[in-house]
Amino acid sequence: MKRLFLLGAVFLSAAADAETLPTQHAKGAGFNACLDLVDGLSKFVIKDNNHGSLATWNNNEADTRLFNALIAVKYPDGHSAAMLNVSPGKTGRCDGSYTTVFYVDKSCSVAREINFSDWKYSGELAGLVVLKNPSGSVDRLLMPAGNGCIAISTEVVYQ
């Protein structure tokens, strides 16, 4: 029986225009089959912001199994956290998803009107408001937290 080990690495980004850390981790792990999707999703989530990343992958079969990155992104006014997952599918194409979490220092109703005014109401989950971005590809859940609001966004991408 083979033992499977996961390897993790923690780094901090020094240059905003450099390759993202999740992309560097995937390359270093030999996760080449879906490297373009890791790169595209991580650049979308991180933009040009300073970030840190903790990545995990299958040490024995990196190129055929799930790649995961936990990403912390620093903004001038706070931080967000993101979880990125990419995996090769049976069809030879790749599937990916990301979830971002960030705190807004406003009530959810105010944040909805000011920060997310272009997002459309999609429904509710257990009493929490769900919004959809203008293109309809991203869902955002608004969860009250003290005097503020935690915004949790998720998107799934199929190549």
Image (cartoon, rainbow, N blue to C red):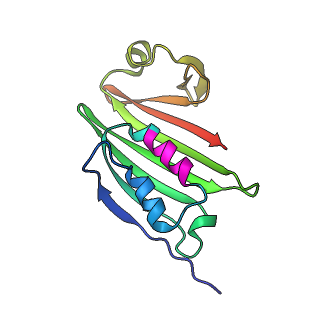
The answer to whether residue 146 is left or right of residue 44 is: left
The answer to whether residue 106 is left or right of residue 31 is: left
When asked about the image quadrant of residue 89, the answer is bottom right
Where is residue 7? Give x, y as percent: 44, 70
Name, please, the residue furthest toward the bottom: 1
Question: Where does the C terminus fall, quadrant-wise?
Answer: top right
When asked about the image quadrant of residue 74, the answer is top left
Where is residue 82? Give x, y as percent: 43, 44
Identified at 51% across, 43% down, the residue is 40
Residue nearest the observer in this picture, 116 or 158: 158
Residue nearest the observer in this picture, 61 or 155: 61
Q: Decide whether residue 22 is among the magenta residues.
A: no
Q: Decide whether residue 37 is among the magenta residues.
A: yes
Residue nearest the observer in this picture, 62 or 33: 33
Identified at 35% across, 32% down, the residue is 103
When asked about the image quadrant of residue 109, the answer is top left
Over which residues does the magenta segment extend? 35-43
Magenta highlight: main SS: helix
